[in-house]
Image: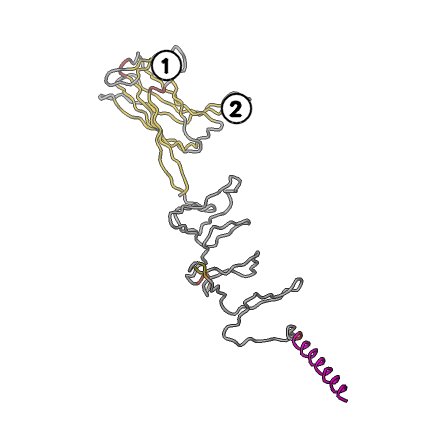
């Protein structure tokens, strides 16, 4: 009888052990919603959420903070893998409606295209984007007409500044159209270059491509009653397979005076846009008189007035 009771007691203990183990194992496999009501619920050894293939959605109704420090400096929350964010990244409550901008405390590398919908501002001495590789497409729309910063140019609708430039050609640049054309350089007042009657001389005009040739002014000494100093502006279109086409663009002539020194102007109508890819420009200088002009007819210089535009 005692032996039977002893066996029964052992059986009950074994059954109780298995029931207890089963309850403990089942406690790790929750199938219903569970709420942790503690003020702080610690998972000190880590936590796993979701699984391969099905994942799951985790709701954080609050703020995530890393309370640990390193030598007294707060440690950031660390993501040890690539991060995919389906929504927008914001810092303030009202996104663009508040002044709480997103702060990035490091450099940024962007693999894809970037679009800026508002003004881009550079501070602390920064002056703009630095393109590290020459392969970047600088014609892309990095900035639009919505920018307010004056350091940037709108690609789609730039504002243009018109500026006036001056180009001076003096007698030291002159060359004879023919070796028989005679001249003399005056080494005394009123200086300049005396040209033989009927002789023709050229002055090449080398302006940047794309500028507008607007006008030019002759500076001369004309005390010759019967003669004048005449200049003409020509363009010569060069064609390797044909004879160059020469067109006169303008001309002006001096008029004799008691003082001698004078100017003569010519304004081109319309303005001529220089095209140095196919065209040469030159002035023709000629003294005309019934008799040899001598010291009474002298050439000083030509000043060319041109316009150039640039984005501001």
Crowdedness near tag 1: few (<14), some (14–19) or many (≥20) residues, C-alpha within 10 Å? some
Helix, strand or loop for disc 2: loop
Whether 311 is drawn above or below 195: the answer is: below
Tag on residue 199?
1
Helix, strand or loop for disc 1: loop
- Furthest toward the top, the residue is 180
- At x 40%, y 25%, the residue is 205
Drawn side of residue 157 relative to residue 261, left or right:
right
Query: Which image quarter holds the C terminus?
Result: top left
- At x 39%, y 36%, the residue is 308
Disc 1 and disc 2 in contact, CB within 8 angstroms: no
Residue 131 at x, y percent in the picture: 48, 43
Q: Quadrant of residue 305?
A: top left
Residue 266 at x, y percent in the picture: 35, 29
Residue 245 at x, y percent in the picture: 49, 23
Q: How is the image coloured?
A: secondary structure
Query: Which image quarter holds the N terminus?
Result: bottom right
Magenta stretch: includes residue 110: no
Drawn side of residue 2 relative to residue 91, left or right:
right
The residue where tag 2 is placed is: 239
Whether 233 is drawn above or below 294: the answer is: below
Q: Which residues are magenta?
A: 1-24
- At x 26%, y 18%, the residue is 191
- At x 52%, y 42%, the residue is 137
């Amino acid at each position: 009888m005692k032996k039977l009771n002893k066996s029964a007691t052992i059986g009950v203990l074994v059954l109780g052990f298995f029931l207890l183990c089963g309850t403990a194992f089942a406690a790790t496999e929750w199938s219903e919603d569970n709420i942790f009501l503690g003020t702080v619920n610690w998972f000190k050894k880590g936590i796993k959420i979701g699984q391969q293939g099905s994942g799951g959605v985790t709701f954080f109704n609050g703020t995530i903070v890393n309370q640990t420090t390193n030598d007294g400096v707060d440690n950031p929350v660390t993501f040890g893998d690539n991060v995919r964010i389906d929504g927008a990244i914001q810092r303030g409550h009202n996104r663009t409606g508040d002044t709480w901008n997103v702060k990035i405390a490091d450099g940024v590398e962007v693999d894809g295209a970037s679009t800026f919908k508002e003004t881009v501002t550079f501070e602390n001495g920064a002056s703009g984007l630095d393109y590290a590789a020459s392969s970047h497409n600088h014609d892309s729309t990095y900035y639009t007409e919505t920018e307010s910063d004056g350091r940037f140019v709108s690609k789609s609708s730039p504002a243009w500044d018109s500026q006036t430039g001056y180009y001076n050609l003096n007698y030291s640049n002159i060359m004879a159209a023919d070796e028989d054309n005679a001249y003399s350089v005056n080494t005394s007042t009123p200086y300049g270059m005396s040209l033989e009657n009927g002789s023709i001389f050229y002055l090449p005009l080398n302006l940047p491509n794309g500028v507008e040739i607007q006008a030019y002014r002759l500076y001369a000494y004309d005390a010759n009653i019967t003669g004048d100093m005449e200049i003409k502006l020509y363009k010569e279109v060069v064609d390797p397979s044909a004879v160059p086409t020469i067109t006169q663009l303008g001309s002006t002539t001096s008029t004799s005076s008691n003082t001698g020194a004078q100017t003569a102007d010519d304004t081109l109508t319309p303005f001529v846009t220089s095209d140095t890819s196919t065209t040469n420009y030159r002035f023709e200088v000629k003294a005309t008189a019934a008799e040899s002009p001598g010291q009474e007819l002298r050439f000083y210089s030509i000043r060319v007035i041109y316009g150039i535009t640039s984005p501001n």
